[in-house]
Image (cartoon, rainbow, N blue to C red):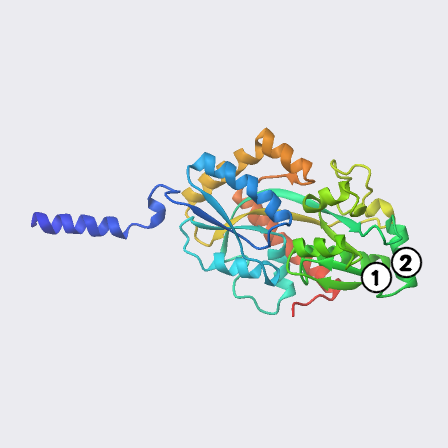
Amino acid sequence: MNQRIVIAMVLASCAALPAQAQTWPAKAVRVVMPFPPGGAADTLIRPLTVKLADALGQQFVADARPGANGNIAAEIVARAAADGYTLMFGNSSLPISVSLYDKLSFDVLKDFTPVSLVAMTPSVLVVHPSLPVRSIKDLVALAKKQPNKLNFASGGVGNTMHLAAALLDSMAGIQMTHVPYKGAGPAIVDVIAGQCDMVFVNIAPVLGHIRAGKAVPIAVTSKTRSTVLPEVPTVAESGMPGYESTTWYGFLGPAGLPREVVTKLNAAIVSAVAGKDLRERYIALGAEPETSTPEAFATLIRNDIPAWAKVVKAAGAKAE
């Protein structure tokens, strides 16, 4: 065979090799974040991107794409090339969306490749200091006297912030008014400013406000008390036995993400989160560091879909 033809065939073959066959990462990696800066996702992802960049030799750039309860970011990642250069730092809003929306532009179980959990975070119920309640008992009593007068902020219809409050409404037999925002950051700002009475929010972004006396913590939503707010009781021990609402955060990629990329990224995440400095930083922010295998993460998402569906149905929540 003519030597030029052979060379041309080899070059064509090399050009046809998928991007994942090359060494990953060979350039900056985009990490799409479903929520705006200032929320729990932001406080967790920023230090982790630095660790991943150090470990893998390329920049990991957080790209906030808020809106539609995280579905804008999810669609971006679901439609991205499965080459490891577009990832998502997602949370429990992903399985919630299955029951919240009549139709999604992606399939939660088929259009993503779970890589690893990063952290589990309880929420804390905080109220503006002017609200005359300092416990769940106080809140329930006031809400029963004034149906629909008390209001709570959230990061959007049907997200974990909304559903945590809706679950309390359902269990306590009260009615509060929901005021949705585009993300946790804006919701927190209006509670601190006194525009809203309260918010169920991950501990990390509101911890500074609590310590400054600008927000009063009433209860945490986990089974046990938070190590960073040990004096704050759980909702369950405050007269609502069985109440629990926690949020997971983790890395996902588009469907078909090459196994070698998944394995390499998972190892880097597990190592980074296990590191003393990042682990201590997460705990100080009220988050529980928790990594996983890709398979265990996939199982968690699958099991979350029916579990959250029950809460959505009880809340009567529906995306507009």
| Nearer the observer, 8 or 161 | 161
Residue drawn at x 88%, y 56% as measured from the top left? 140
Residue 153 image point, x, y percent: 74, 58
Determine the residue located farthest toward the top in the rendered image. 276
Do residues under tags 2 and 1 come within 8 Å of each other at their CB atoms? yes
| Nearer the observer, 88 or 208 | 208
User: In the displayed structure, would residue 243 be above or below residue 179?
Assistant: above
**Is 308 left or right of 235, judged from the image as shown?**
left
The mark that comes first in sequence, 2 or 1, is: 2
Query: Given the image, on which type of amino acid does mark 1 rest?
Result: Leu
Residue drawn at x 74%, y 66% as measured from the top left? 316
User: In the displayed structure, would residue 189 be above or below residue 45?
Assistant: below
The residue wearing badge 2 is 142
Where is the C terminus found, in terms of image quarters?
bottom right
Determine the residue located farthest toward the left in the rendered image. 2
Q: What element carries label 2?
A: helix
Q: What element carries label 1?
A: loop
Residue 4 image point, x, y percent: 9, 49
| Nearer the observer, 300 or 53 | 53
Query: Given the image, on which type of amino acid does mark 2 rest?
Result: Leu
- Disc 2/disc 1 C-alpha distance (Å): 8 Å
The tag on residue 150 is 1
**Is 8 left or right of 44, judged from the image as shown?**
left
Query: How many residues crowd around disc 1 within 10 Å: few (fewer than 14), some, or many (20 or more)?
Result: some
The tag on residue 267 is none
